Image (spheres, coloured by chain):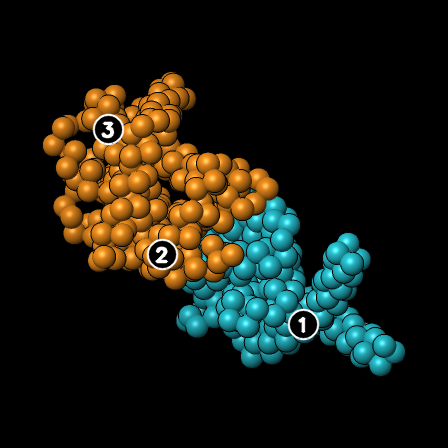
Chain colours: A orange, B cyan
Amino acid sequence: MHPLRKILAIVAKDLAAELRTREMLGAMFVFALLVILIFNFAFELRAENQRTLAPGVLWVAITFSGMLGLSRSFIREKDRGSLEGLLLAPVDRGVIFLGKMLGNALFIAVIALIILPVFVILFNLSAAVMPQLATIAVLGTIGLSGVGTLFSAMAVHTRAREILLPVLLFPLIVPVILSAVKLSAAAIDNLPFAEAQQWFSLLVVFDIVFAVLSFLFFDYVVEE
Amino acid sequence: MKHPMDLMMGLLIVTGLLMVSAIVLALGIAPDAVNLATPTERFAQRIFYFHVPNWWVGFLAYLVAAVAGALYLISRQERWDAIGVSSIEVGLTFNTIGLVSGSIWAKPTWNTWWTWEPRLTTAAIGWLMYVGYLMLRSAIENPQRRARFAAVFSILAFLDVPIIFLAIRWWRTIHPVVIGSEGGQGVGGFALGPTIQLVFFFCLGAFTLLYVTLMLVRLRTEFLSQRVERLRQHLMFR
């Protein structure tokens, strides 16, 4: 069996489990909506130009709801006793990591793409920015789920479990949040790509470097 | 056990003497920086002799922890884990002192306690990362697993620091760049004369020795606690 098919088999497993229970995507979606709503209430009275806040609100919504998905990723396996089964599967540990990472990225990206139209409507933005924002959302999502999947596998073995994941993950993904926010702002303000290009490069570099590092370190995290 | 303790005592005394001399040199001997306008600024500038070595030690401590983490993952020897956690605890202490003392300097010089400037922001994020490291450790009971996770985290965190710094640097910076710049750039920057340099490098050496001393003291505690742990396991499973 080709490694890619093994990876996709793990993604299909996570997807099937999710489609049968629908416990995660629903919660993530409602949570992301709540974040946008709360920010609207919190800032409406003071900010003169809501558009300046829009990129920040979008990325807080995506990272926070993404955190929910990431922390469930391995807790779900552990609680159902399927973690051992997954690790005993006759595949490389790297394949398991890539499968879980791809699954996580898929869930977060789906949520991001669903809330995008809602976000555009609530902040009264032009629909023309949607393709750009969607591209940025996908890139940011890859950044979140690379090191996020690794830390999720770590957090599941700790006493604090889901509480620990954001504490560990947020400081490390500061470059992702920063560049995604800057890129989104540039897209919303309709700036030429050249002005935001350095943020784009930073985001892509971070995605690659930390996905590779997490891939390499995954072996050490799940070794027993 | 008498001999190593004597060495430790000697090291403590030497470090203490050097640190006292560093204070005397920095506050009494070093000349005023020439291009700073107000007496407050000139007085506040003397933080330079402690603040910069302080951050050097913080950086060194995190580097040592990352290297120790890599060596642990390769060799699986408990002592590398002990070195990692000791170094991060010492580093975090210096990191905290650096944030607080820098803030005190920023008030007279920049007229604000805090600003979202690259070095400050990176320092704050680094602080949060390594506090997370200690929380991660305290949430894991199995010693081997704790050591493995801690090693992985300390390596990733250290590799992330330059990327975070670069990301935040693309905002405007007002922090002085004294070393390797002409006459000092940034608000509160100043030129380095020969005496200033001499005193500075003396302080740098004294702080580095202080790091080594604190590491050795902390390591001894860690080795003892590992031994207690082993004895307890031994008694429980006998």
Instruction: Report crowding for label 3: few under 14, some 14 to 19, many 20 or more residues within 10 A (C-alpha).
Output: some
Task: Bin the neighbour count of mark 1 within 10 Å (Cα to Cα): few under 14, some 14-19, many 20 and up.
Answer: some
B187 up-or-down from B53: above or below: above
Q: Nearer the viewer, residue A70 or A120?
A: A70
Question: Circle 2 sits on which residue?
Answer: A90
Q: Chain of mark 1?
A: B
Nearer the observer: mark 1 or 2; the answer is 2
Q: How far apart are the two marked residues, 1 and 2, measured between alpha carbons?
A: 47 Å
Give the side of residue A152 with respect to residue A49, left or right.
right
Query: Which element is circle 2 on?
Result: loop
| N-term mark: 2 or 3 | 2
The image quadrant that residue B94 belongs to is bottom right
**Does any portion of residue A42 appear in the rendered image?**
yes
Displayed quadrant of residue B195: bottom right
Query: The residue tagged with tag 1: helix, strand or loop?
Result: helix
Res A114 label: 3
Q: Please tell me the numbered disc located at residue B212.
A: 1
Which chain is disc 3 placed on? A
Residue B41 on image: x %, y %: 57, 56
Q: Residue at x 25, y 47 (%)?
A: A8
Of residue B19 and residue A200, the one placed in the foreground of this image is: A200
Q: Amino acid at mark 1?
A: Val
Residue at point 47%, 40% (across, down): A81
Residue type (three-letter) at the residue carrying disc 2: Pro
Q: Position of residue B113 (x, y in %)?
A: 55, 44
Q: Are marks 2 and 3 on the same chain?
A: yes
- Residue at the (38%, 36%) spot, across then down: A69
